[in-house]
């Protein structure tokens, strides 16, 4: 059996498409027949609402897993897609940082909780837009990091700091952590700026830059308000085709031998 791959979707800048990428990659991986768990680790809980799951009162969330000793498997919720599951978030996560800070082995809290979830082929974690203790927990728990980067003027700003934090976590807590790749989002082919940003990222990241770019797309932007991935909202849109291709490229970037070498 292949080992579960845990992928952090991370950029400390807000509004770069982390949640959109988490939801839609998860949806298309599940359509490949993979069992996928999304973990909403952002207090804004946009992955949760983007899947239409905010109305479930009294449902346990990631906050209960980290702070109340709840088993991770017991808070997993089904989504409307076969093979796609979610550990939801709620706004209490914002104050969880303070509680986590006082705990022993605080950087490993999330890893200890999700390490037994071997049922899934992929676990995708939507990170908060900050390099916080919660984010460190996600990096310690993850095998790979995918960085969505908006095709805009300040795209590379903050990336070096993010990579430094990754290296620090790799040295101190998680020697297996690797960069899976950088994905360009909100790409507008009508502007030379988008092309310039892609070229600059190519220069900096080489084959770590995904070939697939995610376009600016109205249908993609409106899908979360319907509580659906783009695959269910408008599967023929440019945004849908892009995420389908990105999911395919992602699976090709993780060769089977890589998932099988650690038993």
Image: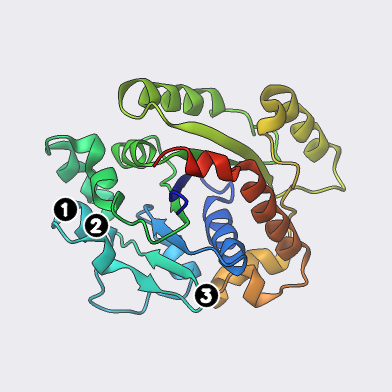
Sequence-earlier tag: 1 or 3 = 1
Seen in the picture, residue 153 relative to 150 is either above or below; the reply is above
Seen in the picture, residue 100 relative to 41 is either above or below; the reply is above
**Mark 2 sits on what residue?**
63
Image location of residue 72, percent across then percent down: 26, 60
Mark 2–mark 1 distance (CA, rounded to whole Å): 6 Å
Residue at left 74%, top 29%? Answer: 202
Image location of residue 75, percent across then percent down: 27, 67
Image location of residue 31, percent across then percent down: 61, 69
Tell me the element at label 2.
Answer: helix
Tell me whether the residue at label 1 lies in contact with that at label 3, contact meaning CB atoms closer than 8 angstroms: no
**Mark 1 sits on what residue?**
67
Q: Quadrant of residue 129?
A: top left
Tell me whether the residue at label 2 lies in contact with that at label 1, contact meaning CB atoms closer than 8 angstroms: yes
Tell me: 56 left or right of 84. Answer: left
Mark 1–mark 3 distance (CA, rounded to whole Å): 28 Å
Tell me: 245 left or right of 111. Answer: right
Residue at left 29%, top 37%? Answer: 133
């Amino acid at each position: 059996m292949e080992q579960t791959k845990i992928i952090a979707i991370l950029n400390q800048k807000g509004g770069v498409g982390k949640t959109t990428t988490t939801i839609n990659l998860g949806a298309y991986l599940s359509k490949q027949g993979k069992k996928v768990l999304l973990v909403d680790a952002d207090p804004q809980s946009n992955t949760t609402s983007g899947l239409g799951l905010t109305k479930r009162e009294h449902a346990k969330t990631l906050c209960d897993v980290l702070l109340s000793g709840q088993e991770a498997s017991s808070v997993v919720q089904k989504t409307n897609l076969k093979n796609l599951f979610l550990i939801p978030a709620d706004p209490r996560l914002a104050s969880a940082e303070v509680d986590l800070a006082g705990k022993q082995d605080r950087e490993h809290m999330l890893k200890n909780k999700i390490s037994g979830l071997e049922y899934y082929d992929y676990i995708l974690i939507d990170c908060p837009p900050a390099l916080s203790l919660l984010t460190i927990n996600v990096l310690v728990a993850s095998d790979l990091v995918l960085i969505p980067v908006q095709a805009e003027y300040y795209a590379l700003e903050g990336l070096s700091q993010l990579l430094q934090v990754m290296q620090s976590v790799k040295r101190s807590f998680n020697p297996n952590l690797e960069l899976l790749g950088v994905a360009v989002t909100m790409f507008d082919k009508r502007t030379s700026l988008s092309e310039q940003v892609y070229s600059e990222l190519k220069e900096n990241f080489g084959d770590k830059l995904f070939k697939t770019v995610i376009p600016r797309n109205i249908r993609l932007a409106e899908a979360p308000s319907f509580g659906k991935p783009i695959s269910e909202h408008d599967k023929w849109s440019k945004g849908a085709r892009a995420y389908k291709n990105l999911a395919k490229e992602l699976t090709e970037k993780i060769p089977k031998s890589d998932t099988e070498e650690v038993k």
